[in-house]
Image (cartoon, rainbow, N blue to C red):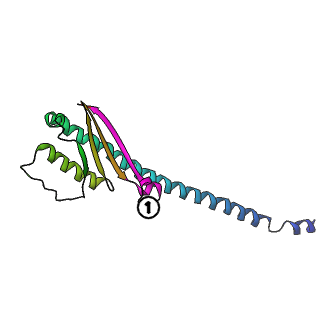
Amino acid sequence: MSAHRHYQQGFTLLEVMIASFVLSVGLLGVAGLQGVSLKMTQGSYLRLQAVNLSYEIIDAMRANRTAASAAGYNGSVTATCNSALTYSVTSTVAKADLTIWGNRLACLLPNGSGTIAQTGNLFTVRVTWNDTRFDGQTDSADTYHSFNFTTEL
């Protein structure tokens, strides 16, 4: 019987090592899942900002229907983030709205820009931004995302 015990020495140590290995692989999986979750949360936040900014300019256009119908809001908007934004008092309401909207695009979205196109009474707002965190790539055409919103005034 004592010879039989001799062959089983160290078996518990082997079980502990295997359990430690399985636990460490599981913890690495949880860490990876946390990283992916963080990226997706950031991407979701940026999409939410794009939706809100689209609604924001559409609301401004509804408040100023005359200028919107006369193509006062049509075109592309690109700006740099300026926390001390000022605009000319002599500018039209539409130009002031677009200046403020362009600044908010630049401040809230990385490389944010917007386009407004009109077809009759239909207006399409397109907000574009760069989400390099989502794709894990450098600044390229593949990292740009956009949100399109079409409405009738």
The x, y position of residue 121, in whole percent, is: 24, 30
Q: Residue at x 32, y 38 (%)?
A: 149
Instruction: Relative to 60, say whether 45 is above or below.
Output: below
The x, y position of residue 43, in whole percent, is: 41, 50
The x, y position of residue 111, in whole percent, is: 32, 56
Instruction: Relative to 19, say whether 123 is above or below.
Output: above
Which part of the image, by quadrant, shows the C terminus?
Answer: top left
The x, y position of residue 98, in whole percent, is: 19, 47
Q: Nearer the viewer, residue 121 or 24?
A: 121
Magenta stretch: includes residue 104: no
Q: Residue at x 17, y 45 (%)?
A: 97
Which part of the image, by quadrant, shows the N terminus?
Answer: bottom right
Magenta stretch: includes residue 150: yes
Question: Horizontally, is 7 left or right of 133 in the view?
Answer: right
Q: Name which quarter of the figure residue 21 lies in.
A: bottom right
Q: Residue at x 16, y 56 (%)?
A: 85
Helix, strand or loop for disc 1:
loop
Question: Horizontally, is 22 left or right of 153 in the view?
Answer: right
Instruction: Relative to 87, say whether 70 is above or below.
Output: above
Q: Name which quarter of the figure residue 117 lies in.
A: top left
Question: Which residue bears the numbered disc 1?
Answer: 138
Question: Horizontally, is 13 left or right of 34 in the view?
Answer: right
Q: Which residues are magenta?
A: 130-151
In the image, what residue type sits under mark 1? Thr
Question: Horizontally, is 23 left or right of 80 in the view?
Answer: right
Q: Residue at x 37, y 49 (%)?
A: 45
